[in-house]
Image (cartoon, rainbow, N blue to C red):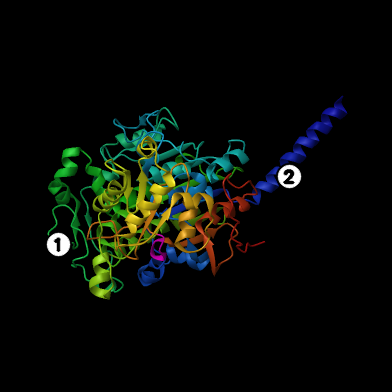
Amino acid sequence: MKRFLSLITLSVLTWTSVFAQFTEDKPKLVVGIIVDQMKYDYISRYWDNFGDGGFKKLVNEGYFARNGQYNYAPTVTGPGHASVYSGTSPAYHSIVNNHYYDRELGKNIYCVDDDRYETVGAEGKNGKKSPYRLAVTNLSDELKWASNLRSKVYTVSIKDRSAVLPAGHKADGAYWLDDKTGNWITSSFYMDELPEWITEMNSAKKRPIDTYMKGVWELSLPVEKYSASMEDNNPYESLLPGKKTPTFPYEMKKMLAADRVRVKSGRKYDLLKSTPFGNTVVTEMAMQIIDNEKMGDDNFTDLLGVSYSSTDYAGHAFGPQSMEVEDVYIKLDKEIEHLINHLDEKVGKGQYVIFLTADHAGAQNTNYMREEFNFVAENVSSKDDSKVINDFLVEKYGEGKYVVSYYSGMTYLNRPLIKEKGLDLEEVQKYAAEAIMTMPQYAAAVMGKDLERQEYTLGYKGLIYNGFNPRFSPDVYGVLRSHFMDYQKTGTSHFSPYKYDTHVPIMFYGWKIEPGYTHAPHTVTEIAPTICSFLNMNYPSGCYSDPILIPLKK
C-alpha cells in the first residue's frame, strides 16, 4: 500500500514538474493593445516625434508586420475588436457593424446592448451590455478553457464595445468609462459588484479624471516639430465646444462650460474622450488592474486587453492631417512607454508579450481631397440616398416603406412587406442595387443573394463577402466611390473596403520575440492564432486563419 501511495505521489510530482516546465515556456501575461482608427503610416509619419520607449521600442525590439490588413468590410470598431480577438471575420463571429438591423427584432440594435443585465458601478443604462451576440469563442475564452478557468482575463477601454468584445464570454472583468459620473463601470454579466479597489477609486475625493477635466490640452513639442501635419488653423477640422477656431490650446473647463448638450444630458465626461486625457485614464486603469489583480503572478498565463479610443474621437473631429491627431499620437507614445515600464517592473522583462494593432484605419477628409488634390470626392447623406432607393422601389412595386434601415450603402429591405406583397426577395434586391447605381457617388452594389451563393476572394467583393453574415447583414451593399464619405464635412470617418481604411499596423513585442519585420501580407485575424500558438492552446472556434510565422528566441 505504501509503495502504491509512493508511486501516486511520484506521478503527481512528476506531472506537476512537467506542467511547471511547460508553463515556464509561455509568457506570464498577454497584453493586447488596440488603437482605435490608427492608420498604418502614423508610425512613419510621426516617427521623429516619438520617444525611444513607446512605438519605437515596439518596432525596434519587436516584430512588425508592415502589410497588416483588414480582410472584410465595413471597417468599424465593434467588428474590428471582435475580429482581432476571435481570429475570424463578421461572416462567422456575427458582429457585422456597431449598429445594425436585427430582422427578428424588427429594429436597429447596438452590438453589445443587453437589457438582461444591469449597470455595476453607476446608475443608468451604460452598463447594460454583454458579448452574447459574439457567435464564436475568442482568444480570451480559449485561454480560460486551456487553464481550466485559472487564467485571469481583464479588459479596459473608454468605449463599452471595445472592452466587452475582447473580453469574451468568461472574463473576470471588463471595464469602461461612464460618461456621466467619470466612474469605471461594468455589467452584471461579469459581476454583481465592483472590486473594492475600483469602488475606492470611483469614490475618491481627488480623482485624476476630475483633474483632467480642468486641464489644458497643449502641444507636446514646439509647433515647428509638427511638420507631418497641416497648419493648426485649417478648414478641414471640427470645432470643439466654445472654440472659434480648431487651434491649441484646448481648455477643458472652458469647453465644458460652453457645451450645452453635454451639460444638459449630464454626460460631461464624454468631452474627455476627444482629448489625450481619455487615453491617459485608460493607461492608469490598466496599470491598476495589473497591480490589484496580480496579473502575470503565477504559472497560468493571464490576458489584459487595452483599447485606446481617444485616437478615434480625435480622428473623427480633426482628420489625419491635423496637429491634434499628431499630438494625440505623440502623447499616446508616452502612454505606451509608461505601460511597458510598468509591465517590466511588475511582471518582468521577457515575461509578457504585447500585440498592438488597430480596429480600422481612416480616410482623408473629403474636402481636403477635393480642394488640395483635385480628387472627385463628396460628402453624401444616408437619408437622401435611402429616399432614392425607396422611391425607385415604390415606382416599381407601389406604395410602401421598402427600406427599413440604411447607412452608407448598407441597405436593409422590408422583408415582411415584400412577403406581404408576394414579391421575390432576390428581384427586389436586384432593383434596389439598380437604384443605388443611379447615384453617381456609388462605385458598385452587391446583392446579398449573390453573396449567399457565390464566394468572392478578390477586391472589395472579397472584403464584403468576408463581412457578410446572412442573418444580420444587409440585403444590398452599396460601395461608395473612393473618398466619398457618409459623414460631416470636417474631420473624417472610416467604413469602406479601401486601403486607407484597411491598412493597419500589426506588432508583437516581448517574451521570446526576435526583432524583425515583414512586408508579406497578413490580416488582423492572424493575431489570435499567433498568440494561441505561443500558448500551445486551441484556436478560437471560428478561426480559419493561420498564425504569423514570427521568429522566436530559443
Q: In the rendered structure, which amino acid carries the disc numbered 2?
A: Val
- Residue 169: numbered disc: none
Can the viewer see residue 110? no
Front: mark 2 or 1: 1
Q: Is residue 84 left or right of residue 418?
A: right
On the image, the x and y values in percent for residue 223 come to: 24, 71
- Region in magenta: 497-501
Q: Disc 2 or 1, which lies upstream in sequence?
A: 2
Vertical position of residue 93 compared to residue 331: above or below: above
On the image, the x and y values in percent for residue 521 come to: 53, 66
Residue at the outermost top position: 1
- The residue at which mark 2 appears reads as 18
Give the Cα separation between the discs numbered 2 and 1.
64 Å
Q: In the rendered structure, which amino acid carries the disc numbered 1?
A: Thr
Kindly indicate the quadrant of the structure image that contains residue 417: top left
Front residue of this view, candidates 374 and 22: 374
Vertical position of residue 57 compared to residue 393: above or below: below
> Is disc 1 placed on a helix, strand or loop?
loop
Q: Is residue 85 magenta?
A: no
On the image, the x and y values in percent for residue 384 come to: 24, 52
> Is disc 2 placed on a helix, strand or loop?
helix
Graded by Cα atoms within 10 Å as few (under 14), some (14 to 19) or many (20 or more), the crowding at tag 2 reads: few
Front residue of this view, candidates 425 and 353: 425
- Residue 245: numbered disc: 1
Front residue of this view, candidates 464 and 521: 464
